[in-house]
Image (cartoon, grey):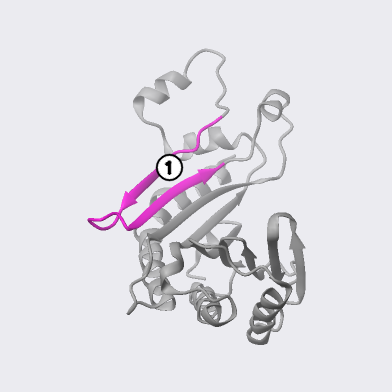
Amino acid sequence: MNNYNSICDDIHVNLHLNTEMDLPQSRESVLHFFEQVQKRFSSMTNFYARERGEFCLEEDKEGGQHRWVSVEPRRLSSGWVNPTSIESAIEQHQSILELMPYALTISHLDCESLNFAMGFHYNYRGNQNELLAEALGMVPALERMSEFPGASILGYEPSIQLSLDDDCRTQCRLEFETRNNAYQVRTGEFSEDQLSVYVIVRRFDSLRSEENYAVELARLAKICTEMVDSYVVENVLIPLQQTIALK
């Protein structure tokens, strides 16, 4: 897994296609799509419906890794938690994109955004916001503010969003999610929820007639993995791992 599993506790690799029009919600269309998915990934056996028109097919979660695919009214998603390799996860997502024009009647015009996302998750039972501030640092103005006598950091989730082309159609976002609240900080009783780091590369607007969803996903995945390998691992993930190890 490109050694990502050696610097975090869990990783996920996801695809999200947001559409301009509602996806088919009839029983026949939904079941036909997931039957086609299951033919390609026979270990996906758990099918269920959630509220608000979301349907999901997934593997058992007991082994520490699992694949899943979901259909919402205006979003198609595919994910793999702790995949055997990033390449295998990309192949899964491309396979879903190859199925959808026939099973869900999604055309190249129907793309509001196509997203490739990698998430890195850390087990840390403590003030995750303070941990982030310590591991990544803060801009001087904010750091001075955090030094106010008796202050504890309740929220610190920095993010950066980049445009990767002149028309801002391809964008990259790095963001964090902490899972603490004021009660936990006040009592010192912290949950076992994970601290998460997300790297998301997103393409906006419809595809051109000569473009292909699977090929476009490969382009986004290449940008995302390059961003992770060239910048995020050394400057974010390893500092987080090292700071947690010292606690």
List x then y, in percent, for residue 202.
41, 59
Q: Nearer the viewer, residue 134 or 67?
A: 67
Q: Nearer the viewer, residue 105 or 137?
A: 105
- The residue located at (25%, 58%) in the rendering is 165
Q: Does residue 180 sit above or below 23 in this rendering? A: above
Specify the amino acid type for callout 1. Ser
Q: The magenta stretch spans which residues?
A: 155-177
Indicate the quadrant where residue 233 lies: bottom left
Q: Is residue 2 visible?
A: yes
Q: In x, y percent, where is residue 221? A: 41, 68
Q: Is residue 236 left or right of residue 68?
A: left
Residue at image location 47% in from the left, 46% down from the top? 175
- Please determine whether, in this image, residue 227 is positioned above or below residue 136: below
- Tell me where residue 99 sits by quadrant: bottom right
Magenta-drawn stretch contains 173: yes
Q: Give the side of residue 43 with respect to residue 204, left or right.
A: right
Q: Nearer the viewer, residue 233 or 27?
A: 27
- In the rendered image, the vertical position of residue 13 relative to residue 151, given as above or below: below
Describe the element under mark 1 as helix, strand or loop: strand
What residue is disc 1 on? 159
Asked if residue 157 lies left or right of residue 23, the reply is left
**Residue 42 belongs to the span the image colors magenta:** no
Residue 132, percent from left and from top: 50, 38
The quadrant in which the C terminus is found is: top right
Residue 144 in the image, given as x and y percentages of width and height: 40, 20
